Amino acid sequence: MDYSTNFSKSTSKKKVVAVVGGGLVGALNACYFAKRGFQVEVFESREDIRQAKIVKGRSINLALSHRGRQALKQVGMEDTIVSKGIPMHSRMIHSLNGTQYPIPYGKKGQVTLLLQPAETYSNTKLNFAHKLLNWSTETGAMTFLRADGAKEEIQADLIVGCDGAFSAIRKQFLRQSRFNFSQTYIPHGYLELTMPPINGEFAMKPNYLHIWPRNTFMMIALPNLDKTFTCTLFMPFDEFENVTTGDQVIEFFQKYFPDAIPLIGADALKRDYFRLPAQAMVSVKCSPYHLSDKCVLMGDAAHAVVPFYGQGMNAGFEDCLVFNEIMDQLNEDFSAVLPEYTRVRVPDDHAIADLAMYNYVEMRSHVNSKWFLFRKYIDNFLHIIMPRTIIPLYTMVTFTRTRYHEAVKRWHWQDKVRNDIVHSSLYKVLLRTTAFAEIFSKARSEKGN
Ligand SMILES: Cc1cc2nc3c(=O)[nH]c(=O)nc-3n(C[C@H](O)[C@H](O)[C@H](O)COP(=O)(O)OP(=O)(O)OC[C@H]3O[C@@H](n4cnc5c(N)ncnc54)[C@H](O)[C@@H]3O)c2cc1C
Ligand SMILES: NC(=O)C1=CN([C@@H]2O[C@H](COP(=O)(O)OP(=O)(O)OC[C@H]3O[C@@H](n4cnc5c(N)ncnc54)[C@H](OP(=O)(O)O)[C@@H]3O)[C@@H](O)[C@H]2O)C=CC1
Ligand SMILES: Nc1ccccc1C(=O)C[C@H](N)C(=O)O
C-alpha cells in the first residue's frame, strides 16, 4: 500500500522542514531547525542505529576540531560530545627505522578531539527506514521507500538534503540548467585495521595522530575510547592488488611498518587485512547548493571531500552554523536565505576540498622532508612573534573559523612572505660571509706583502 502525507498543511504556525539523511550533519541540522521552532521531520534510510543489533559502517572515530565544536556549541551539545573525546596534540611520525618524533599541531592547548559518533539527539520526529527514492523539483513531493516495502509520498516547506556523498536529493539538481557538478575518485583506497590494547592500556601514546609516512602511501592510527587504535592504510589500489595472501601482508608490513606488526598482531593482521576490500575515496564539488526556496544541500551531499584533513564532518557542521547565522540575518526568509547560503558557502567548501587533497601529500610525504620541517618551524616561530600577521595554515583550518577560502589565500601570501624572509636572510648571510672572506683574504695578502 502507498501513503501520502502533506506535512506542509500542518496546523503548526511554523513551516515544516524535512531533513533527508539522519547522519552526522542531518542530526545536527534537525537540532538547529527544531531550536528555531520549525516542525522537523528527519528521514533516514537506515534502521535506528541505537536499536540495531548489527551496525554496518566503518570508521568509528572522527577528529572534531574548532569549527565542529562551535557548531555543536550553538545547540548546547559541545560539552557532551567533547567529554567523550580524546585530545590529540600532535602528529607522531613513525620512521622506517622504528624511531618516532612528534610534530605539534599548534600552540599548547590547541587540540583536536575525537568523537564517537553514534547517538543522534533530537526533539523532532525521526522517521527511520525511509529511503528517499525520488522527489519532484516542481511540486517538492518526495517519495520514500519504507522497510515494509510501501512507498510514502511526503511534502514539506523546505527540503534539506543531508544524505551523504551519493545524495539522492542532489540527483535532481543535475537536471537543472546552470548546475555545476564534478566528482573525482582518487586512485588511492583505504583499509582499516584495529590495534588492540596491551595489558588494558593503549598500545601507543594516545594523544597523537600516529603517521607512518612512506611518500607514495601512508598508514595512520587514531585512538578510541576503548583503548584500541583504528589504523587506516591509505595506498594506491594497484598496490593493494599486489598483496593477496597473508604471508604477503606480513612481508609488506615488515618492509614498511615493522613496528606495527607486534602491536596489531601478526595473526590478526593476516586475517583483518582481507576482511573488507579497500574502499574508494571521492571528492564531489557542486554549485549552487540550493534550488529556489525549496531545497538546500549540506554536508557531504554538497561537498564530499577526501578524508585527509579530518575536516569533512567539521565542514558539514559548519554548514549548519553558517546557515543558522544567515537565518538570523535574513529573518528566516527561505527565498533570501538559500541563495545567500550558496553565495557564502560554496567558495569555502570548494577550498576545503582542495586542501584535503593537498594534506594527503603533506601527511604521506612532506613530513619526511627536512626543508618542510624547517619551514614549519619558521612559521610557528613567526606566529609566536607576530600572532596576528602570520598564522600557520593548519592553525587557521583546524583551530579557527577563518573562512576556508580566505585561509588558502592567506597561506599563499604567508608562504611568499616567509620565503622572502628566509631567502633575504640567506642572502644577507651569504653577502656577509663573502664580504668577511674578502676582508680576511685582503688582510692576509697585505700581511704577506
Ligand atoms: C575514512 C574516513 C575518515 C574520516 N575522518 C574524518 C574526521 O576525522 N573528521 C571529520 O571531520 N570528517 C571525517 N570524515 C568525513 C566524515 O565521515 C563525513 O564528512 C561525514 O560523515 C558527513 O556527514 P553527513 O551527515 O553529511 O553524511 P553521512 O554521514 O554520509 O550521512 C548521510 C546519511 O544519509 C542517509 N541516506 C543516504 N541516502 C539516503 C536516502 N536516499 N534516503 C534517506 N537517507 C539517506 C545515510 O544512511 C546516512 O545516515 C572521514 C571520512 C572517511 C571516509
Ligand atoms: N569522501 C569520501 O571519499 C568518502 C566519504 N564518506 C562519507 O561518509 C559517509 C558514511 O560512510 P559509510 O557509512 O561508509 O557510507 P556507505 O558506504 O555505507 O554509503 C552510504 C550509502 O550511500 C550509497 N552508496 C555507497 N556507495 C555508493 C556509490 N559508489 N554510488 C552510489 N551510492 C553509493 C549506498 O546507498 P544504497 O543503499 O542505495 O546502495 C549506501 O547505503 C558516506 O555517506 C560519505 O558521505 C565515506 C567514504 C568515503
Ligand atoms: N582524521 C583524519 C582521518 C583521515 C586522515 C587524516 C585525518 C586527520 O585528522 C589528519 C590531521 N588533520 C593531520 O593533518 O595530521
Image (tube, helix red, strand yellow):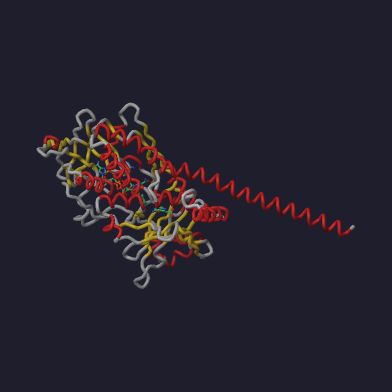
> Does residue 30 appear in the picture of this structure?
yes
> Foreground: 201 or 193?
201
Q: Hey, which residue is sitting farthest left in the picture?
A: 11
Q: Hey, which residue is sitting farthest top in the picture?
A: 177
> Foreground: 44 or 341?
341
Q: Is residue 91 above or below residue 323?
A: below
Q: Position of residue 240 (x, y in %)?
A: 44, 51
The N terminus is located in which quarter?
top left
Q: Position of residue 269 (x, y in %)?
A: 40, 62
Residue visible at 32% across and 31% down in the picture:
174
Q: Hey, which residue is sitting farthest right in the picture?
A: 449
How many discs mark residues in the rendered view? 0
* Quarter of the view holding residue 82: bottom left
> Foreground: 153 or 92?
92
Residue visible at 50% across and 59% down in the picture:
256
* Quarter of the view holding residue 285: top left
Specify whether 4 is left or right of 29. left
Specify whether 299 is left or right of 129. right
Q: Position of residue 5 (x, y in %)?
A: 12, 37
Q: Is residue 137 above or below residue 277?
A: above
The C terminus is located in which quarter?
bottom right
Q: Is residue 392 above or below residue 141?
A: below
Specify whether 42 is left or right of 391. left
> Does residue 214 appear in the picture of this structure?
no
Q: Position of residue 138 (x, y in %)?
A: 22, 28
* Quarter of the view holding residue 50: bottom left
